[in-house]
Image: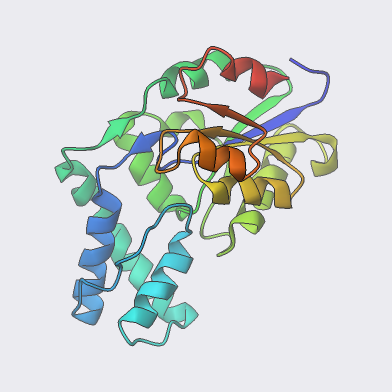
Amino acid sequence: MGSRATVVLFDIDGTLITCGGAGRVALEAAFGELCGRRDVCDFSFGGGTDRAIARRGLSNAGVEPTEDAIDALLACYLRHLPPALARSSGYAVLPGAHAILDSIRGIDGLAIGLGTGNVREGARAKLRPGELDGYFAFGGFGCDHEERPALIEAGASRGAAHLGLERAACRVVVVGDTPKDVSAAHAIGAECVAVATGGHDREELRGAGADAIVDDLRAPELRDLLLA
């Protein structure tokens, strides 16, 4: 790999896995339980953080989205998430996920983590059925911050610490599937390798300014892009 230590942060939904709608099912169940309504999340979750999604849903339900209300809703969501995942016929690990992670883990000077809007417990719950949770020792999560650039920065700092280095000494690469992943990466001075496996095609990802774009995680050039 290149001479500079590197932190690679992977998004989850649409990048490593698809949950087949299980996350939305669990969140709607939480709104139904706490607010008596399941129709308040009629918007895309793509690139959003759990706290921002909860805040918007609570507002739609006519509930003041205080921090305590968001915490209560997400705690309820986390109770519903594992059974929703177990019932999901559409859950799948996306092509190439295991292979790329196997090919880069254990490399000196490289730290592999998560950069996701999911809260930490939700991230682990989503990765566990696909046997992906064991690859990641750290990450930046939706419980670190409601705004994606700040949680990506949290992951970058933890990755640097994992390598025993200062954050400024590390190259940071975000792997994600939405324009929000691209903009968050660039906001903290990181690179973004975009994968066209979510709801955005190559043209949209190129327009967002992705540093590189691959069709999926099987792309033969991906390993070199991460280790450059």
Q: How many marks?
A: 0
Residue 117, image x, y percentages: 49, 54
Left/right of residue 137 with respect to residue 171 in the rendered view: left
> What residue is at 46 percent from the left and 17 percent from the top?
218
Left/right of residue 163 with respect to residue 130 in the rendered view: right
Q: Nearer the viewer, residue 61 or 134?
A: 61
Residue 205 in sight here: yes
Residue 128, image x, y percentages: 34, 36
Q: How is the image coloured?
A: rainbow
Residue 114 in sight here: no
When asked about the image quadrant of residue 70, the answer is bottom left
Q: Nearer the viewer, residue 35 or 207?
A: 207
> What residue is at 79 percent from the left and 42 percent from the top?
167
* Figure check: 55 above or below 148: below
Instruction: Give the position of the C terminus as an image quadrant.
Output: top right
Residue 196, image x, y percentages: 46, 33
Instruction: Give the position of the N terminus as an image quadrant.
Output: top right
> What residue is at 47 percent from the left and 67 percent from the top?
52
Q: Nearer the viewer, residue 59 or 79?
A: 59
* Figure check: 103 above or below 113: above
